[in-house]
Image (spheres, rainbow, N blue to C red):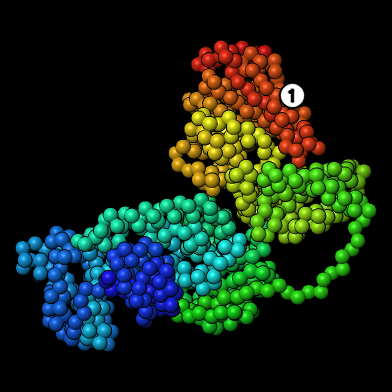
Amino acid sequence: MSAFFATCPKGLEYLLRDELVALGAEDVREALAGVHFAGTLATAYRACLWSRLASRVLMPLAEFDAATDDALYAGVQAIDWSKHLASRATLAVDANSALSKLTHSQFIAQRVKDAVVDQFRQRDGSRPDVDTEEPDVRINLRLRRDRATVSLDLSGAPLHRRGWRELQGEAPLKENLAAAMLLRARWPEVYAEGGALLDPMCGSGTLLIEGAWMAADVAPGLHREYYGFLGWQQHDIALWRGLLDEARQRAEVGLRSLRSCFFGSDADPRMVQTAKRNAQEAGVSGFFTLDKHDATHVSPPLGYTRGLVITNPPYGERLGDRAEMPRLYRALGETLRERFAGWRAAVLAGDAELGHAIPLRAEKKYALYNGALETVLLVFELHAHSETPREVKPLSEGAQMLRNRLEKNLRHLRKRLEREGIACWRAYDQDLPEYAAAIDVYGQDAGGPWLHIQEYRAPADIPAETARHRLREIVRVAGEVLGVPRERIALKTRERGKGGSKYGQFDQRGEFIEVAEGGLHFLVNLTDYLDTGLFLDHRLVRAKVRELAKGRRFLNLFAYTATASVYAADGGAQDTTSVDLSATYLDWASRNLALNGFTGAKHRLMQADAMTFLQRDRERYGLIYVDPPTFSNSKRAEDFDVQRDHVKLLLACADRLASDGVIVFSNNFRRFKLDHEALNERFSIEDWSTPSIPFDFTRRADIHGCWILRLHPQESPWGGTVNHVRNQGRR
């Protein structure tokens, strides 16, 4: 059993004490800016690897009086340094002094270094060198009231440096202070209850990354490559490797189950990019949603009625103008009060005066030090306003009919949905012509499901105001029957938008929710695009892809958000290649793959036009999934029309198909006719359209078509060029 001392910023001592006890430390007692503890070498290693709050972990070697430089020199020389440092190794010395006759820290450090070096030189003529950046051994000398304590710095470098920070802002928040904020605000409890984490002034992303690692049980020191004990003579390599292996396993398990519930924004687009890159380095970017807007425009993420808003606003010391700070804090408080009822909030204010500018009553206040600056952490419980309930108007006759139909649909579908574990499904699809919309249900969490309501074109003889009134009735009735509050309903209205779009301008919230399907997990966005990222009518098509994928190389053309690639990977595909022209969708695809644990070189993402890719690629695939749009007129590729161009597309796929390969081809053009005459010579074709329609889409049996194509037994992909030309000539 050895004695150790873990340093930390002032204000974190009690939190650090509790953390060290949880890590197995004994005889734990707090001191000013640190905590004393006892334990084995494994305890110290574990503190270096797992402490989210400590700055350094020191192992005291000796303590002695040092009122003069000679006494200091003699005390350091009395230690046998050969037990700790090889003669040709490197060292560095950190020194600090308080209330002592020796006051100059650089002089003190120099005398300590001289004493160590002279001992080696006197013994065998060799001497260690100095390396101030990453020495084999870092020595810490603390002089207080003429009493010196010499310690080995096992951490080597400050533990708040986690190893992920590539870039930072002008006034970065140290990671251990961020961890303290999260713990004081009870983030682990909020996460366990299904809540989200939101930072409206995220800067370089420190609070979000610390919050994600905390939720995923990632050791804060797991990404660090340097520790002060790695070059120490008594370092136990096997012990350290065992602790690292355990931490890696815990991180793998934690990240696999981590929810995508981390949201950040910043008014500075450069900081948003910085936060994205830091999140990538930390391995958690797939769980983050980051956007550019100022703090007063922040709203609860779609689907979350609870969570923690946590932020470190500027103080007016190094950033911004002090005179403007109270206005910023006041606006932030008003935003929290008006929009985040039911949430918790934590704000690190630069001082008490700025804290008082927030028009909310703090439940808790904690004094914390951001560097040398004393700050105050304010924690708020944001309660809902007490309002007199509005009188609920009775439903119109038509709305009551809609309610009856929805309730009937729900009774008809519920048992099978529960039996098959289906969480994303269609509840209504223009069953009543007067109420022209599709209602889709997405997911289920502690806050319930979400609804996505998409309006269809009303008949020409229906006045616009009548159509709008009926749409409002759809929203009300759907929310009541399905038990979904208005804030969890996304509505797509069919209004003429800019550039002649059928639909008006969508929101640009960048908000994603995580949903489950077929034992897998996907991110959907209900507000920003016409489609959500998961085509519900293709549920059985994706299952078919999984069934066919085992042992095959998989190619996904027009990959969109790569949901089919995730299914193929889960089905045992050798590898997957997902091709799409949109960088936005490929980023989304990457997050879907990562969310299910499919990362690395086996899962390629290619930004390219599908036809161009097929012409240039020389790989062979055992399974190709082709789900093209009805029409595309991208500036970066030739116009595409699925009816006109599908033969050319499928024959190009044949040239990339293994001899026993399979093509799954689908599209949503309801008047589509497969050109059997042009394709029969090359393929045997199975019309799989009817089996591919899920039971909740039977009212729209023509919502998509699906065909399974295989090369004829005598067909060889290496001899297909002649047939390809002949078939094209028939068109």
**Which secondary structure, mark 1?**
loop
In the displayed structure, does residue 596 sit left or right of residue 369?
Answer: right
| Vertical relation: 412 (above or below) 122 | above
Residue 322: tell me if it is visible: no
Residue 403: tell me if it is visible: yes
Which quadrant of the structure image shows residue 136? bottom left
Q: Quadrant of the C terminus?
A: top right
Amino acid type, mark 1: Lys
Q: Residue at x 39, y 55 (%)?
A: 246
Query: Looking at the image, which is closer to me, 230 or 217?
Result: 217
Which quadrant of the structure image shows residue 517? top right
| Vertical relation: 688 (above or below) 543 | above
Instruction: Point out residue 602 in the picture as x, y percentages from the top left corner.
Output: 46, 37
In the displayed structure, does residue 359 sit left or right of residue 94?
Answer: right
**Residue where numbered disc 1 is placed:** 673
Query: Looking at the image, which is closer to me, 192 or 420?
Result: 420
Q: Residue at x 53, y 31 (%)?
A: 550
